Image (tube, coloured by chain):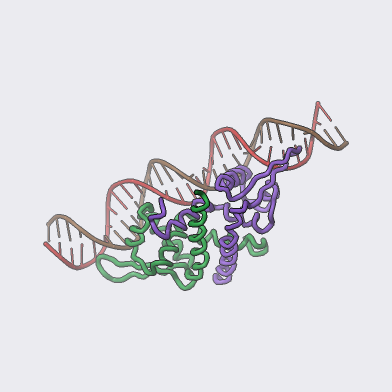
Chain colours: A purple, B green, C brown, D red
Amino acid sequence: MDKSMGTTYGIMTTLQSIGGKWKPLILFILLEEGTKRFGELKRDMPQITHGVLTQQLRELERSQLIERVVYQEVPPRVEYSLSEHGKTLEIVLNNMCRWGFSHDEFLK
Amino acid sequence: MDKSMGTTYGIMTTLQSIGGKWKPLILFILLEEGTKRFGELKRDMPQITHGVLTQQLRELERSQLIERVVYQEVPPRVEYSLSEHGKTLEIVLNNMCRWGFSHDEFLK
DNA sequence: ATACTTAGTATGAAAAATCATACTAATAGC
DNA sequence: GCTATTAGTATGATTTTTCATACTAAGTAT
């Protein structure tokens, strides 16, 4: 996959970074509520599994969309937040959110 | 899942309609290029399987995002296009596309 | 009659994503 | 010593998604 393939390249790149069942939701929560501990995120998404949440956060970190800060305390404290680059997703995420609500209205 | 759960509801609704590996791409192609036959879509997405393309199109139709018109000809001709409601995804899709390109630049 | 076309279905296999569950570390408080 | 806390890892099972492949229908062109 490279840019020579035209405009679809943009969509495909985006999907590779934020595609999946949970990533847009994680990013949106961090966008709306700022810094969050692991446990707080888990509480915000009761459906997600502990292990899956960990894994998704790792992948978002690798994509440089979020930052992970570990505090040397016991019990451990780990905080997640959007990176500067992650914040550039604001427009995308807000539009997705808005469309979801209008689509819901449409279905009635 | 219902609206009482707050703003995350919007994202989750959106993901249910256009989440998945291929749907945003299909929608984006239809947005950019208008009406397309099945075979043309397939050619635009060489990686997707025949069967999976059929299935994704069915789901998008069920979500009322695309329209399917069958012409009584032989060999068969079937045309797909965004529905009026599907066109409301324009902002979302264009933003996703744009972000993909800027993200790509960022990685360099 | 045979080959070609297009859009689609059907099948089972393979891969990916997600799941539940149990486990660890390290310290504080009782 | 025992329990609680938090953020994680590890495991294997299950579910979901995607895959390759072969098949159908129904005319047209040769």
Residue B91 sits above or below residue A41 on the image: below
Labels in figure, total = 0
User: In the image, B80: left or right of A58?
Assistant: left
Residue B14 locus on image (x, y percent): 55, 62
Residue B6 locus on image (x, y percent): 67, 62
Residue at figure coordinates x 65%, y 45% from the top left: A68
User: In the image, A66: left or right of B26?
Assistant: right
Name the residue nearer the viewer: B92 or D9: B92
Residue furthest to the bottom in view is B84
Q: Quadrant of residue A7?
A: bottom left
User: In the image, C6: left or right of A75?
Assistant: left
Name the residue nearer the viewer: B97 or C9: B97
Q: Quadrant of residue A78?
A: top right
Name the residue nearer the viewer: D2 or A59: A59
Residue A75 locus on image (x, y percent): 75, 39
Q: Quadrant of residue A86?
A: bottom right
Residue A56 in view here: yes
User: In the image, D22: left or right of A23?
Assistant: left
Residue B10 sits above or below residue A2 on the image: below
Residue at figure coordinates x 56%, y 67% from the top left: A99
Residue A71 locus on image (x, y percent): 72, 41
Residue at figure coordinates x 50%, y 49% from the top left: B108
Name the residue nearer the viewer: C9 or C19: C19
For the C terminus of chain A, give its image quadrant.
bottom right
Residue A19 in view here: no
Residue A77 sits above or below residue C26 on the image: below
